Image (cartoon, rainbow, N blue to C red):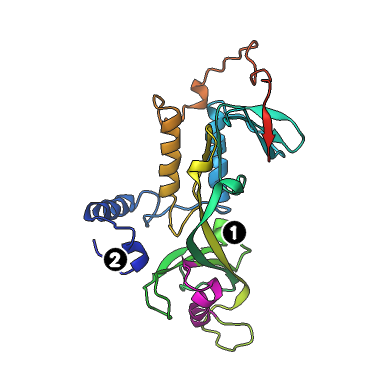
């Protein structure tokens, strides 16, 4: 399996993995439309809501308008619970978090992503409205593959008649230095008269640092997940979630088929406690 992008070569993709990815692409064609891809309405935040609703089907509980302000650890440094911003302790056997909520357990990996997000007055791709495209390495002076994702009003991410475009690639210098030549080549700035190109209505460049957990420093009972990378899909995030699930519940099925609501039998145990009684001698961190 040969690839042009040096950053992908460094991942050492095997021939078997390459064939499996190509096979997955062709198997996905026509599943939910003419392409192999499926995206969300209102942006990727809807994926979190989908998992929340799936969890709720199986009895998951959510606390809204609340955040963790500290951790509860016992004398051996083992995780026992959290303290909310209102000072309420919530006890559990395990905590799963990203690095944003537990920055003391994360570190910069040395890898980063150059990102550009812009809103334009027309499509980059003629009559095509939702498009994923790639620019080969060493084009526009950038050594890596550049990804372009254009979304439109039909996906409920921007006003009617406008287009939202994401552009990203592994960082070399800075987002603006890495991507500006491409942006200037495919878009029209407002003070220019070339009306054949989409006009930029709003634009921002930013660098996304990629962090990873410092596992040797994380207390027992806490799992910290990795930051997302340059991937165009959520396969790695799903694989990580499945790995965490299997480590905690090795005998349970991973995302079983959702039952028909009419088949669900609700059983309420009035004697069940929502949380264990408050233990003694816990110390608070954070």
Specify the farthest residue to the top.
Answer: 271
Judge left or right: residue 132 versus residue 23.
right
Which residue is the site of mark 2? 3
> Where is the C terminus found, in terms of image quarters?
top right
Q: Which residues are magenta?
A: 168-187
Answer with the quarter of the image where residue 120 lies. bottom right
Give x and y (percent) for residue 114: 51, 68
Residue 255 visible in image? no
Q: Which one is in front in this view, the residue at disc 1 or the one at disc 2?
A: 2
User: In this orientation, does residue 220 appear?
Assistant: yes
> Dot 2: what SS?
loop
Residue 10 placement: quadrant: bottom left
Q: Where the N terminus falls, by quadrant?
A: bottom left
Q: Position of residue 227 (x, y in %)?
A: 51, 52
**Majority secondary structure in the magenta region:** helix
The answer to which of 183 and 157 lies nearer the viewer is 183
Residue, disc 1:
157
């Amino acid at each position: 399996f040969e690839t042009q992008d040096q950053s992908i070569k460094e991942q050492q993709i095997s021939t078997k993995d390459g064939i499996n990815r190509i096979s997955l692409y062709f198997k996905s064609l026509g599943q939910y439309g003419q392409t192999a891809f499926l995206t969300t309405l209102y942006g990727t935040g809807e994926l979190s809501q989908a998992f929340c609703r799936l969890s709720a089907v199986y009895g998951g509980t959510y606390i809204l308008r609340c955040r963790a302000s500290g951790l509860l650890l016992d004398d051996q440094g083992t995780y026992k619970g959290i303290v909310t911003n209102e000072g309420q302790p919530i006890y559990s056997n395990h905590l799963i978090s990203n690095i944003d909520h537990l920055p003391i357990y994360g570190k910069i990996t040395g890898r980063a992503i150059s990102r550009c997000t812009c809103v334009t007055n027309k499509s980059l791709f003629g009559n095509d409205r939702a498009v994923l495209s790639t620019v080969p390495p060493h084009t526009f002076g950038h050594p890596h593959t550049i990804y372009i994702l254009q979304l439109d009003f039909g996906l409920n991410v921007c006003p009617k008649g406008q287009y939202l475009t994401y552009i990203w690639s592994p960082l070399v210098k800075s987002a603006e230095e890495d991507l500006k030549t491409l942006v200037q080549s495919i878009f029209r700035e407002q003070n220019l008269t070339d009306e054949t190109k989409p006009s930029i209505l709003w634009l921002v460049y930013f660098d996304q640092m990629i962090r990873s957990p410092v596992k040797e420093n994380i207390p027992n009972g806490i799992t910290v997940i990795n930051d997302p990378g340059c991937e165009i899909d959520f396969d790695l995030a799903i694989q990580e979630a499945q790995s965490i699930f299997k480590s905690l519940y090795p005998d349970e099925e991973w995302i079983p088929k959702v039952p028909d609501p009419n088949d669900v039998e609700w059983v309420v145990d009035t004697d069940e406690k929502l949380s264990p009684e408050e233990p003694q001698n816990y110390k608070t961190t954070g």
